[in-house]
Image (spheres, rainbow, N blue to C red):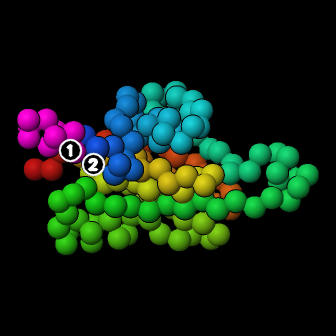
Amino acid sequence: MMGKRAAALVTTLSLSTGAAPASTGDFCARLAENSGIEAPVAAEGRTEWTVNALNFGQRFLFGGTAATGVGLLPVEPATVEDYRRLETMCLPEDKGAVCKLVGPANFKFLWKGKRIITPLTAGERATITVKGTKTTCRSEPSAPPAA
């Protein structure tokens, strides 16, 4: 009886962590799916997309504003080295940021009022660029395994 309760608690805790369930595709395809963004597949099979946090009407008719945020969280259990590795992956640039991601890590995307966590698997690579209200995601070829 106690085993069923423990299993239910573990299931409840894993659902409340904020991490999205694993889905198919490369990182940018998963991020788009988790964020509700349509993502075309690039010619070489990797995903690349650009979106604007404001639609046409919000930008030109009503003068709306929007905030987009990016960040990284380590995969737990994390070491000091894991935190140090993540420190320089997302850096400010112009009026935005550029993230050159290499997994394993959990990417945090603040988009249209939602906090979306999408994991990068070990060796998986992507580049995220935020300029003003536009965000671009481009999946890169995976890094070779560490020797």
Closer to us: 103 or 68: 68
Mark 1 residue crowding within 10 angstroms, few (<14) / some (14–19) / many (20+): few
Q: Is residue 15 visible?
A: yes
Q: Is residue 7 magenta?
A: yes
- Tell me the element at label 2: helix
Task: Determine whether, in the image, residue 101 is placed left or right of residue 9.
Answer: right
Residue 124's disc number: none
**In the image, which residues are magenta?**
1-10
Callout 2 amino acid: Leu
Above or below residue 134? Residue 88 is below
Cα–Cα gap, marks 2 and 1: 5 Å
Q: Is residue 4 magenta?
A: yes
Residue 10's disc number: 1
Spot the residue most to the front: 1
Callout 1 amino acid: Val
User: Residue 20: x percent and y percent?
Assistant: 39, 42
Quadrant in the picture for residue 5 = top left
Quadrant in the picture for residue 64 = bottom right
Residue 13's disc number: 2
